[in-house]
Amino acid sequence: MAISEASDVAALAHSARPRAAVGKLFWLAAGWIALVFLAASLANALPLPDPTRMELLDKRRPPNATHWLGTDGLGRDMLSRLIHGARISLTVGILAPLIGLMIGGALGMSAGYFRRSAETVITGAVDVLLAFPPLVLALAVTAYLGQTVANLTWVIGVLSIPAFTRVARAATLSLAEREFILAARAAGASELRILVRELLPNVILPMLAFFLLAVAVTIVVEGALSFLGLGVPPPAPSWGSMIGEGRESLEVAPRIAFLPAMAMFLTVLAFNIVGDTLRAITDPRQTAL
Amino acid sequence: MLGLAARRAVYLVPVLLAVTFLTFLIASLLPGDLAFAILGDQATPETVAALRHDMGLDQPALWRYLRWLAGVLQGDLGRSYRTGESVLDAVLGRLPVSLELMVAAEITAFVVAIPIAILCAARAGTGFDRLATGIAFAKLSIPSFMVAILLIYLFAVQLRLFPATGYVPFGEDPLGNLRSLVLPALTLAIGEWPVLMRVLRSDMIATLQEDFIALAKAKGLRPRRILLVHALKPSSLTLVTVAGINIGRLIGGTVIVESIFALPGIGRLLIGAIYTRDFMILQGVVLFVAAGFVMVNFLVDTLYALLDPRIRHGH
């Protein structure tokens, strides 16, 4: 489970869905993401109970008028926890790949454009980082750094750099010898200007598509860490830790584990669908077929 | 052929060195003093200084790395600060459980993926193909811990067919051992099959376009024979490589699955070491897993090159 999984998603989807259904599915997925975003950003303004307030007499209540989705094993409001949990999933899920996008993008473009020793050093470093099973590395490093949202974001972000470096390098390699680059160079443009003004606009779209797939993977990684109790520390709600806590109540109230699982599944699926649709649009090989 | 393996092995040395260095770096140079972490509440400046001296932490990092590396090369990974158990013994004692789990999962994944991939390739574009590839796409959005929860709910809570947690050693009760591995292995296999299926499906669709398949059809061979005998073997090279590459993910999944199902493998050792801040064990497990991962990838790469002449000759 790593960012490299995002390329699996991309490759699998290549042949996965019938073309006609892409439009409707895409808008459904984008709509779900917008809804989750809206709910998460308005979490404090919505008339919701405190997500950490326990009412031990109201444990594992089924959905009712005061608790629309019921309460969890400690009597906390499920809806409120789900919505506040979305904040953590989205914060880590978007900021971490952003780190990968910026650093990996810069490294990959440099490797693909300058070639020679820059490429050797960068691809070598990437290979070493890829030698570590990512989840094991993420677990080990967060254990040392301490479990905070910021640390989680940095660790997962750094781990996503190699994948972004590869994507950016591949995209740059295919462009670096093209006529418009030669023309810019002949016109006396500096290397920096060529990288930023000529290459970047062409590399950014496939990178963005990959970014959305990486968001999906990051939400899963954050979920896995929190599920194991090694992500965001309690009592802050996170979808992963909610699923983990719901495990205790699986016999009496499976809803407590299944609701956050459903929220996470739909969100990850939505990012995969949107990312993959964008990838299909921006990938010239795909559209040429 | 041996020359090729040797050349690749030479490349392995710097990568393995870098892996040991990075592992050491994680364990030593990150913020937070190890001595403080071990002493906890009882830390006074004097006790911290004394412990730092005992552990050699007051020496330069590079020197400590070289000393640790020398130990590692002689099979000495140090001892747990908590239990005093040798790190190597701790890892080797739990390795068989993890290996058994991963092998069982991989076999299950192949058993599921291969027939589905063949059927999809034979009927590419039909309803069955779309359904199978659609399910595989959706599956990639369901993380393994979610699959584990679902399986526990279905097979342990509702049907009461398999135990939800626990492990029975093979030596004690072979059947009980297999029973305790069913759900964990199934969890991992469900994560693996979509990837394997996809690779084999697309390779087989390509193979089925080849001339020798047309010839086999013209000779009047039965479709089943063509699929299973003529098309499967040349299509399975990438499958082997992908299975190898995915071992990294499988290891990550094993960590999660072992801790959910309470299996005493290295994943659980790692999580336990993190909970108890047992840094020597942690460092040892990370090194072991990363080095093992590099070696497996090397073996798969080499095997692949030996199997496929085009790669062997650098085309």
Image (cartoon, coloured by chain):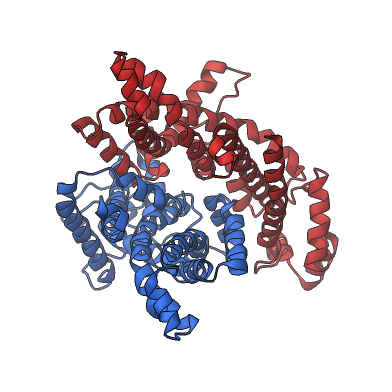
Q: Nearer the viewer, residue A142 or A189?
A: A189
Q: Nearer the viewer, residue B255 or B224?
A: B224
When the figure is inspected, residue B206 is found, relative to residue A273, above or below; the finding is above
When the figure is inspected, residue A54 is found, relative to residue B225, above or below; the finding is below
In which quarter of the view is residue B93 placed? top right
Q: How many numbered circles does the render carry? A: 0
Q: Which of B216 and B76 is in front in this view?
A: B216
In which quarter of the view is residue B30 placed? bottom right
Estimate the x, y position of residue B209 in percent, counting from the top left: 32, 32
Q: Which of A77 and A241 is in front in this view?
A: A241
- Chain letter, red: B
- Residue located 29% across and 52% down the image: A286
When the figure is inspected, residue B132 is found, relative to residue B58, above or below; the finding is above
A138 vs B123, left or right, is: right
Estimate the x, y position of residue B258 in percent, counting from the top left: 52, 38
- Chain letter, blue: A
A208 vs A189, left or right, is: left
A111 vs B42, left or right, is: left
Estimate the x, y position of residue A25 in percent, counting from the top left: 18, 52
B68 vs A193, left or right, is: right
- Residue located 53% across and 43% down the image: B255
Q: Does residue B166 show up? A: yes
Q: Does residue B163 show up? A: no
